[in-house]
Amino acid sequence: MRYTRMESPGIGRIAAAATMVLTAALVISAAGCGSHPKFAGRIVLLSQGTISVITQAGVEPVLTDVVTAALSPDGRTLLYARKDQTLVRDLEAGTEKVILPETGLKAGWNDDGTRYYLLTGCPANKLYVGRPEGAPQRLFQGRKGLYAVGGSSGATIEEEVCAELGGCLFLTSDVFVFSAFDAPLPRTGDIHANKGFLVNLAVDPPEIQVTQFPRQARWRFVDASDVSDQVLISVERNPESAELFQNRVYVCPRFRAWELITFQNELQASFARWENGGWGSAGELAGVFSPNSGRVFGLANEPSAKGWNLYYMVIDPESGDATRGPALPLRPGDVVNRPVFDPEEKNVAFLANLGTEENITVCELASGTASKVWKAPAPKGGAFDARLDRLLGWLD
């Protein structure tokens, strides 16, 4: 994956009043040391509705009133949503266009930036795919139904509920996979994905292969690696019972048909979960392939006399050899979403929600040292919305 400079004529054109407020709230700081930590390149952040570019020199806001966003791998194109519309912005030309009169809640790109996906979430509960130069097409309409719940007075009321739709991942530039609940909605209990959908976008109309998940199980498609040509999958068994819940992590060869998927290479790791994953409160598996080496990088936790320790783990998917990193200055549940690596894969950055503040912690992989490079206090009279805040990229 090649990163290029992200420069936009739109940077610096934010209103002066908004800039003064953001500059007061967003500061570079060091954690546990007396000098500012040094890091190369630019970290792109979405926090509390504002997209900012963070460098060693400071913080520059780019866009405000943003609900969700995804940055293309080359850093040139931004897919983002505001209230009642979703847009694609060319960051080099400073131009943008509305592609959908709906608000997206989750978005992502394939590895070469030629396609994107967009989830609208409930109540629309739609999945779109598209190209930056064209209009998106609706790929799937999630199930919705009236759900019987107990009212405050004890009477039974009906509430519209959306079934699960997510787990979206580009396996290749043109092959896309996701999970969804595709059946008549049950009247009680949580509604989990029960089928997987494998989509070939290279043909028109797209060719879709469907598979039924094993009973009381679901698959989460976590990440794909061009380096190792493998896919990271999380399998949850008996997700409807917290007491009997089991989670296993597998690395399998990249597949183009369901019959080619294998669950032979199980990773012996107990990964945590990102707080704002696309699967509700449970989040997504806290694991990802490193972009240059193709190793599995994940967060794990273990009990201690003082609570839980959070640390990172690097696993060779071929041999299973694991290298444990030092304990992080974070707690399980603090990390908001999957990390971003610098272009040389020497450092990794996490966005953390500590309740009273949100911060970005950078870990140097060679030494295991960690330092805080950005922080912001919690909104006055409110709390962070950790479901939407995320790191969008680390550019040169």
Image (cartoon, rainbow, N blue to C red):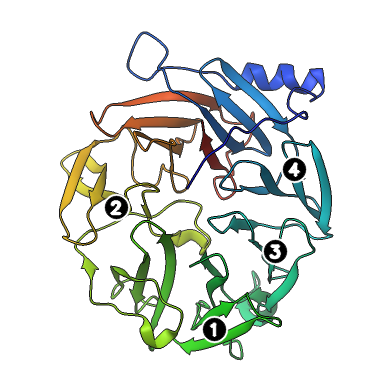
Identity of the amino acid at label 4? Asp
Q: Earlier in the sequence, mark 1 or mark 4?
A: 4
Assign a secondary structure to mark 1.
loop
Considering depth in this image, is 94 or 267 the residue closer to the camera?
Answer: 94
Instruction: Give me the C-alpha separation between circle 1 and circle 3.
Output: 24 Å
Q: Amino acid at mark 1?
A: Thr
Q: Is residue 374 above or below residue 64?
A: above
Q: Nearer the viewer, residue 385 or 229?
A: 229
How far separated are the C-alphas under marks 2 and 1?
Answer: 41 Å
Identify the element where label 4 is drawn: strand
Residue that label 3 marks: 120
Residue 63, quarter of picture: top right
Which residue is under mark 1?
Answer: 188
Could you tell whether 273 is left or right of 179 in the image?
Answer: left
Q: Nearer the viewer, mark 1 or mark 4?
A: 4
- Image location of residue 151, percent across then percent down: 65, 73
Circle 2 sits on which residue? 295
Distance between the alpha carbons at the discs numbered 4 and 3: 22 Å
For the point 37% across and 83% down, the residue is 260
Relative to residue 345, is residue 81 drawn left or right? right
